[in-house]
Amino acid sequence: MNTRHHRRGIPVVAAVTAGLVVATGLVAASTASASAATTTLDAAAASTTLVTGDLPGWKQVLKDDFSTPLAAGSFPGPYASQWMTYDGFPDTWKIGAYDADTLSVSGGLLDMHLHTGADGVPRSAAPIPLVNGQWGGQTYGRYSVRMRADALPGYGTAFLLWDDENVWANGEINFPEGGLEGTTHAYNHQLGTPWNNDLVHDTGVSYQAWHTYTIDWTPGRISYLLDGVTVATTTTNVPRTPMHWVLQTATDGTKPAASVDGHLQIDWVSQYSYAPSTATSAPVTTPAPAPAPAPAPKPTPTPAPAPAPTPTPAPTPAPAPKPTPAPAPAPKALTTTTPTVRGDVKVGSTLRASADGWTPGTAVTWSWRVDGTPVPGATGSTFRVRAGDVDRRVTVVATGSAAGYTTASRTSASLLVLPTTYFSCGALNSEHPAGVAKSTSARDQVGTRTLAQPAGTTVSATVYAANSRLDVDRDGLVCERR
């Protein structure tokens, strides 16, 4: 069984470098650009050498100019604190494979050797920068890379920002993207319908020359800079959730000829977090104290008046009778609607509930349930679907209360949790450590031996059916581990 694969959004485990297939295609249909290019030069983004230090509005969180040589087959080696890479599973188009052995460092360049292996499978790479040594991204940032590539028909790039939660609908930003024998492009995908492009821009420059590519992602705006000049900008469909950077190469939808063999080289990379500058307040000065006034002359004392006579107290009136209190008004009925649940109903995804249209001022509490049973601790408006929820139905109960109204509860429509299709056994085992069996009668075939299912095996016909392609020995168990 192959256990080295990982699906999108799974960080590195132990000593295995792993990754996720993210780009939806290295070359997309042409659409109109969202803006025209500007000629204002950004000096930092135009630099041919690595810029060190913060910039106005940006805080540098990662930089690398690849000064330590490293032989092919050793990556990440000394770069492990700043890099991981996809390794050992099919590329986006399922034509080639990501292979860490294609990566090496020499002459101050990170080199990707793009070629067809002895098994006839094209090889590529997709290294991922690690900020502070940790997998995961950030919301907004600047991303710069200086790179070039040989003209290699059948290979391409999709250097991209990809959602940390692995939800494509949350957005995808690509630059540079395209076939290596052509020109570089900038892309932005629509939120919610990411198979549609929000922006496509052809820079008109080839991959063969050295260029510096920069993505500036800020609230409400994405700008694409080529050698310091903004070539495209969009203010629509701007992602708002954390994303991580992937320097992805792969086949471009066609299988390269076995004779196609060459290199993509990266001189340096730099990543910044978004740190908008703030206005500096003017210093506050303390006024000098006013001189003390000269003391006024003491006035001549006025004689005290004669004491007034003590009045005779009036008689105490009899207390008024207590009025009978009016009955409290009957509480009114809350206006309610059925809660709405949004999100992919599959393992690892986050579901979000909302109760729109309730009486203004209503305080709403939540209770998530699986097959009608409350989930302990699941009392917020979001719920992360667990591996054990597959084939079961998820609902959420919204309970509202407001002063002067009766408390009311409404239950959402039930949602069936669908099985996840994993890209690899590594990804499947991260949620089903002992593997998945299609039935309790399935037995593990190991050579000529027939063994019982490993302890802890998940028995689910639907999860097995969704991942049966990983059952290479066709014994009814997927990715079994002992």
Image (cartoon, grey):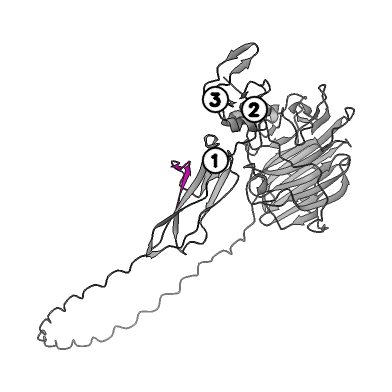
First in sequence: mark 2 vs mark 3? 2
Q: Quadrant of residue 52?
A: top right
Magenta stretch contains residue 313: no
Distance between mark 2 and mark 1 Cα atoms: 20 Å
Distance between mark 2 and mark 3 Cα atoms: 14 Å
Q: Which residue is mark 2?
A: 425
Task: Report the number of discs.
Answer: 3
Residue mark closest to the camera, 2 vs 3:
3
User: Going 22% across and 88% down the picture, which residue do you hit?
Assistant: 302
Which numbered dot is residue 407?
A: none
Question: Mark 2 and 3 residues: CB-CB less than 8 Å, in contact?
Answer: no
Do we see residue 9 in this rendering? yes
SS class, disc 3: loop
Which numbered dot is residue 385?
A: 1
Q: Does 405 sit above or below residue 432?
A: below
Q: Does 93 sit above or below residue 281?
A: above
Q: Quadrant of the C terminus?
A: top right
Residue mark closest to the camera, 1 vs 3:
3
> 345 left or right of 337?
right
Q: Amino acid at mark 2?
A: Cys
Q: Nearer the viewer, residue 117 or 129?
A: 117
Question: Mark 1 and 3 residues: CB-CB less than 8 Å, in contact?
Answer: no
Magenta-highlighted residues: 365-380
User: Going 68% across and 41% down the picture, which residue do you hit?
Assistant: 62
Q: Quadrant of residue 295?
A: bottom left
Distance between mark 1 and mark 3 Cα atoms: 19 Å
Give neighbour class at mark 3: few <14, some 14-19, many 20+ (Cα, 10 Å).
many
Residue at the far top: name it: 448
Which numbered dot is residue 457?
A: 3
Q: Does 301 sit above or below residue 479?
A: below
x then y, percent, for residue 17: 67, 29
